[in-house]
Amino acid sequence: MKLTNCVDAAVMQVNTVQRPDGLDACWFDTVATRYGCMIQGATEAVLTNLDVLGYLDDIPVCVGYELADGITIDQFPVTAELQTAKPVLRTLKGWKCDLSHIRSFEELPEAAQQYVQYIESSIGVPIKTVSVGPRRDQVMTR
């Protein structure tokens, strides 16, 4: 199972960290997601698979790109610059616990709530729905 933001598959291919189960998990790319939300005219967002981050001490989040000329930008780069751009990461505190049993946002560990709130403020669109597993009862509305 991969955690992706489904905005740009080319970006997500380079944004991976190794999970304990041997599969890849992608870090959240706030720049690409903010761009995707703007292009699509999104008025709210859904954050899925929050539970798969529960094993991490620290959670990397892409907050910008360093271009080939060394300039750092916080906007999504044009296609010609994207292939050589390097993600600029900010590390957020992990929560180191299983979230799959949680059914309301308020029940989430403080670090998980802060992660969602950080993503929300970074993409500029409210995150109205969060999932902590694959089942319907593992989806919470804020």
Image (cartoon, grey):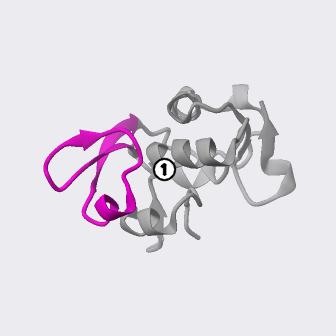
Q: Type of residue at label 1?
A: Ala
**Which residue sits at x=52%, y=51%?**
53
Q: Where, quadrant-wise, is the N terminus in this rendering? A: bottom right
Q: Residues within 10 Å of mark 1 (few under 14, many from 20)?
A: many
| Magenta region includes residue 125 | no
Query: Can you give x and y, in whole percent of width and height, for residue 105 in the image?
Result: 72, 31
Answer left or right for 12 relative to 91.
right
> Is residue 100 visible to us here?
yes
Can residue 20 be seen here?
Answer: no
Q: Nearer the viewer, residue 21 or 79?
A: 79
Q: Residue at x 71, y 25 (%)?
A: 106
Q: Position of residue 125 (x, y in %)?
A: 64, 33
Q: Quadrant of residue 78?
A: bottom left
Q: Residue at x 81, y 58 (%)?
A: 135
Q: Is residue 87 magenta?
A: yes
Stretch in magenta = 63-92
Q: Which residue bears the numbered disc 1?
A: 32
| Residue toward you, 108 or 121 | 121
Q: Residue 95 in the image: state x and y as whole percent.
A: 50, 38
Q: Dividing the image into 4 quarters, which one contains the C terminus?
A: top right
Q: Is residue 119 above or below residue 81?
A: above
Eyeballing the image, is 99 above or below 19?
A: above
Q: How far from the left and from the top, in percent, is residue 47?
A: 65, 46
Q: Taking 6 as reference, is 41 above or below it?
A: above
Secondary structure under tag 1 reads: helix
Kindly identify the residue that appears in the image at 48 percent across and 71 percent down. 21
